[in-house]
């Protein structure tokens, strides 16, 4: 009899544990690869406020993530490094238009393992060397598209095209520079801030438009309240302070 009661008690305990776990919300966030490090810190601090929301991240180029959402891949929240990719999803009604919020800005820098002299001129540097330059793939990676446009604005694209190494996303560009597979790379300033290997950065001229990161809830998400909660945290003063710590800039006209 005691053994039976013990088994019943154990079953009730297990049932209680199962119900607690079932109450947790699982949130899948598709995020631009340049957000990888800052999102780890964001997750830790968000969990202190919302301990019952479990975050899982899917990182990649914004264009690749957008394509995945278009093809029906599961996602609750899209954090993009590209307004264009967000607008494409909006045109297909695949994201909640009312939820779209810009949450950060970034800028392009030329990166190197060695420091640049203070008097270094960008054009002179890239034209008077045979060194390879890593950039994102222009047709599929927002960083690559931004880089190509900036170089074209400076009439440098054709001159440098045979020395460019293309990467699948922003993080791979950083890896190419850090590993020495490319002596130079055009990366986001936020990635330069967190890199332990990169010592030299030089602002890339020709960037005429701001690089804005928008976020939005995916229309088919079954966890829209949790997705909204996390996006609100990212855009809150606390979330903005974390982004600033990792080298991102607040949206123009806003302060973290």
Image (tube, rainbow, N blue to C red):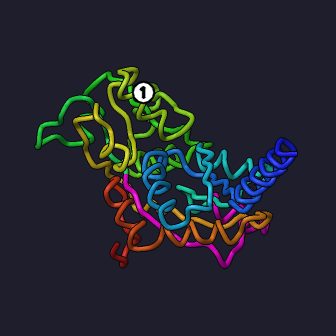
Instruction: State the image coordinates of residue 130 (x, y, percent, origin top left).
Output: 32, 21
Which residue corresponds to the image point at 40% horizontal and 57% vertical from the top-left?
Answer: 106
112 to 131, vertically: above or below: below
Q: What is the number of callouts on the image?
A: 1
Q: Which residues are magenta?
A: 85-107
Q: In the rendered structure, does residue 90 fall within the stretch colored magenta?
A: yes
Looking at the picture, does residue 181 appear above or below residue 38? above
Q: Which residue shows up at 55% across the image and 66% down it?
A: 50
Drawn side of residue 197 relative to residue 31, left or right: left
Q: Position of residue 126 (x, y in %)?
A: 30, 34
Please identify the quadrant where the C terminus is shown: bottom left
Which of 208/186 is in front?
Answer: 186
Instruction: Using the image as rendered, state which of residue 201 and residue 104 is in the foreground.
Output: 104
Vertical relation: 161 (above or below) 212: above
Front residue of 245 and 3 = 3
In the drawing, does residue 20 fall left or right of residue 246?
A: right
Residue found at x 80% / y 64%: 220
Which residue is tagged 1?
176
User: Residue 181 appears in which quarter of the rendering?
Assistant: top left
Q: Position of residue 187 (x, y in %)?
A: 39, 42
Q: Quadrant of the N terminus?
A: top right
């Amino acid at each position: 009899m005691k053994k039976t009661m013990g088994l019943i008690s154990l079953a009730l305990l297990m049932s209680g544990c199962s119900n607690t776990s079932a109450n947790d919300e699982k949130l899948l966030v598709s995020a631009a690869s340049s957000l990888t490090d800052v999102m780890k810190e964001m997750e830790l601090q968000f969990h202190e406020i919302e301990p019952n929301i479990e975050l899982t991240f899917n990182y990649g180029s914004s264009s690749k993530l957008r394509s995945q959402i278009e093809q029906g891949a599961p996602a609750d929240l899209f954090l993009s490094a590209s307004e264009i990719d967000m607008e494409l999803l909006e045109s297909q009604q695949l994201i909640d238009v009312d939820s779209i919020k810009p949450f950060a800005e970034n800028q392009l820098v030329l990166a190197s393992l060695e420091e640049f002299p203070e008097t270094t001129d960008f054009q002179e540097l890239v034209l008077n060397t045979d060194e390879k330059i890593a950039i994102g793939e222009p047709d599929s990676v927002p960083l690559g598209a931004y880089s190509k446009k900036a170089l074209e604005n400076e009439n440098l694209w054709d001159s440098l095209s045979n020395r460019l190494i293309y990467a699948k996303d922003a993080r791979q560009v950083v890896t190419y520079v850090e590993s020495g597979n490319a002596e130079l790379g055009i990366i986001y300033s936020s990635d330069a801030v967190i890199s332990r290997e990169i010592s030299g950065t030089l602002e890339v001229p020709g960037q005429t438009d701001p690089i804005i990161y928008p976020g939005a809830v995916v229309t088919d998400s079954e966890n829209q309240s949790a997705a909204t909660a996390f996006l609100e945290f990212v855009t809150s003063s606390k979330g903005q302070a974390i982004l600033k710590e990792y080298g991102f800039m607040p949206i123009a006209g806003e302060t973290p």
